[in-house]
Image: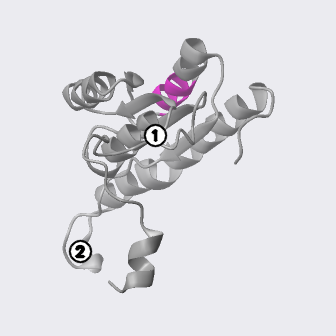
């Protein structure tokens, strides 16, 4: 690093938290699908650290409970709802639960998905293709439609 670059960077503060917050999402309400692990869980932690109240969804209750507890332990506001993107009723119920808990929805991260089974494309069984479609396209579509409607009802605060 050259001297000019070093002068632009603030000095490290050993007493500062490992992940300082700019409070970019203070007062916002976020729904995150696929939040039981991986990118969804990391997004939940970052959004909460930035001030958003987060509602997490996934199919696995134990994973959701773990992430919810981590967010709360770090001082964030978090709740979770078990939801299967292949089941439109649970998707809509999850969005409704966000509005019940917080009165509105401002942000949605539609992260939940299922992978295509590894192997040659021409050997993918019809049932596997149907499941990928059901979750990764239809489930996402239903989630976005419910989320946009919830955002619109929340005084137009959200963006699609």
Extent of the magenta region:
88-95
Query: Height in image: 64 above or below 116?
Result: above
Q: Secondary structure at mark 2?
A: helix
First in sequence: mark 1 vs mark 2: 1
Q: Residue placed farthest to the bottom in the image?
A: 2
Residue 84 placement (x, y as % from top left): 38, 34
Distance from disc 1 to disc 2, alpha carbons, whole Å, reads 40 Å
Asked if one can make out residue 134 in the rendered structure from this viewpoint, the answer is yes
Q: Nearer the viewer, residue 2 or 60?
A: 2
Residue 82 placement (x, y as % from top left): 35, 25
Label drawn at residue 47? 1
Residue 5 placement (x, y as % from top left): 42, 79
Q: Residue placed farthest to the top in the image?
A: 100
Q: Secondary structure at mark 1?
A: helix
Q: Nearer the viewer, residue 105 or 115?
A: 105
Horizontally, is 142 left or right of 36 in the view?
Answer: right
Label drawn at residue 71? none
Residue drawn at x 77%, y 26% as measured from the top left: 153
Query: Height in image: 136 above or below 156?
Result: below
Q: Nearer the viewer, residue 142 or 106?
A: 106
| Among the 4 quarters of the image, the one containing residue 57 | top left
Residue drawn at x 30%, y 33% as measured from the top left: 59
Residue drawn at x 27%, y 31% as measured from the top left: 67
Query: Height in image: 86 above or below 54?
Result: below
Q: Which dot, 1 or 2, sits closer to the camera?
A: 1
Badge 2 is on which residue? Answer: 123
Horizontally, is 90 left or right of 34 in the view?
Answer: right
């Amino acid at each position: 690093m050259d001297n000019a670059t070093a002068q632009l960077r603030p000095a490290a503060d050993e007493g500062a938290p490992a992940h300082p917050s700019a409070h970019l999402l203070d007062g916002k309400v976020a729904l995150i699908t696929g939040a039981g692990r991986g990118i969804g869980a990391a997004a939940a932690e970052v959004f909460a650290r930035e001030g958003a109240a987060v509602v997490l969804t996934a199919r696995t209750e134990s994973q959701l409970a773990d992430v919810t507890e981590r967010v709360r332990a770090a001082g964030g506001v978090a709740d979770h709802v078990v939801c299967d993107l292949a089941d439109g009723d649970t998707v809509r119920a999850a969005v409704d639960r966000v509005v019940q808990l917080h009165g509105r929805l401002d942000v949605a991260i539609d992260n939940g998905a299922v992978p295509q089974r590894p192997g040659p494309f021409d050997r993918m069984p019809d049932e596997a293709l149907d499941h990928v479609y059901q979750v990764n396209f239809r489930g996402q579509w239903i989630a976005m439609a419910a989320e946009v409607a919830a955002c619109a009802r929340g005084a137009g605060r959200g963006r699609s």
